[in-house]
Image: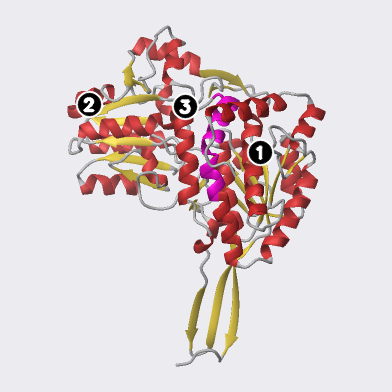
Amino acid sequence: MAMNWTEAQIEEVVASVLKNLQKETPAMQAAYDGSQYNGKKYIGVFADMNDAIDAATAGYKAVRAMRLEEREKIIDAIRKLTRAEASVMARLGVAETKMGRVEHKTAKHILVADKTPGTADIVASVKTGDYGLTLTEMAPFGVVGSITPSTNPSETVICNSIGMIAAGNGVVFNPHPNAIATSNYAVDLVNRASAMAGGPKVLVASVVKPTLDTAQIMYKHANIRLLVCTGGPGVVRSVLSSGKKAIGAGAGNPPVIVDDTADVVKAGKDIIDGCSFDNNLPCIAEKEVFVFRNVADQLISSMLANGAYKINAEQAAKLANIVLVDVKNPKTGIVKKTVSRDCVGRDAAVLLEKIGIKVGSDIRCIICETDFDHPFVQHELMMPILPIVRVDNIDQAIDLAVKAEHGNRHTAHMHSKNIDHLTRFARAVETTIFVKNAPSYAGIGFGGEGHTTFTIAGPTGEGLTSARSFTRYRRCVMSDNFRII
């Protein structure tokens, strides 16, 4: 296991993977189903979804027979390989998807390795009383079908794998088509780790060319007992309508409120740090700001001192016409604004250049003052573009922030030292994650307490998923015995 990759080795692997990915289907299948590149193989990646499910089923049977400590050995090996190859997957992810920042994706992989719960998350409970003893245990579902995104591709594959394996499941993935190489590299990594730790050669599986058709096979296959989807509204809806038990991690549009009791200078830095992290790809990232009018100038000044570039209303309108495009629904004929794929996750400098502004690499985020109805406020852009709306008081701030969140109940943020204000906003917005006085990424354990996950299940209520989320409860009752008092 190579613990220290050189820059040349990383570039060679990334170039080789992407070259294979661009070949026609037969060559792609050869590249992903056994042939070598640079002495490495993609293990567990199949041309046919049915074959992938069969392999994951065999993996499930093997891991189900293991002791918890044996599962934990596999998870420990996954953590070690993830740390060792974090920069490889980060570089590959940016090269393939053209989204995000290498240094931030590297940090996300390290976060996954260090703070994704393993088998310690699987805890039994016991109740005793006059009528005996009842034992409740967390059991695996069997084979989990997982849909993963292009925004956090390898991070989600590895995070889900750790949790699902800890719970005793096998896993088959249908990755986002725009992140095949990166996602399947992570599948290969998990399987390499399994083999290193004495587990099955194929514990998790995937397909060479994931499509809507391969997803449908996954949804309908008898061996798939649980579906887990991390993605946009459309794919989450399709999973939830599959007729099977499903966990859905959907979209968000996280607002942040800054009142006049906050440490405004710190708030400015925290918001830019959170909003610009991996170019705003994380679904928890700050998407729009509502700031008290009497501290707005100070907040903006702090943002400018921490890597923000402010554009005026005319420039914002011009940029909005580039990053948001009109898309016509073929069934209804209705035209609606949709985020341009060519702009998602791009550097601030790249976006500014589209409107004729050239800046250096020190600029991490574009800010602009808007009204509440501006499309930058209403749409989840997933770009380092941050609209700022001035408000008069906490009532107006909460009202507008809740409306901007659109009922996703995903994530919200607030910078304040007023406990009443913090409490009122948290109660009103009802989000899965609520971050106080910190960058958004503190909400998933990066600079904050608690475990991490890249599958945040707001629509189905599991919240920040972990191993226990991928289990079903089983009860065993012994009547009149095993109580010793």
Question: Circle 3 sits on which residue?
Answer: 381
Question: Circle 2 sits on which residue?
Answer: 296
Q: What's the CA distance linking mark 3 and mark 2?
A: 23 Å
Q: What's the CA distance linking mark 1 and mark 3?
A: 26 Å
Please give the name of the residue rendered at 70% of the width and 36% of the height, measured from the top-left corner: 39
| Circles 1 and 2: CB atoms closer than 8 Å | no
Give the number of the mark in front: 1 or 3: 1
- Magenta range: 79-98
- Of residue 185 and residue 143, the one placed in the foreground of this image is 185
Q: Amino acid at mark 2?
A: Ala
- Of residue 38 and residue 246, the one placed in the foreground of this image is 38
Residue 253 occupies quadrant: top left
Q: Is residue 448 magenta?
A: no
Question: Circle 1 sits on which residue?
Answer: 184
Q: Amino acid at mark 3?
A: Leu
Between discs 3 and 2, the one toward the N terminus: 2
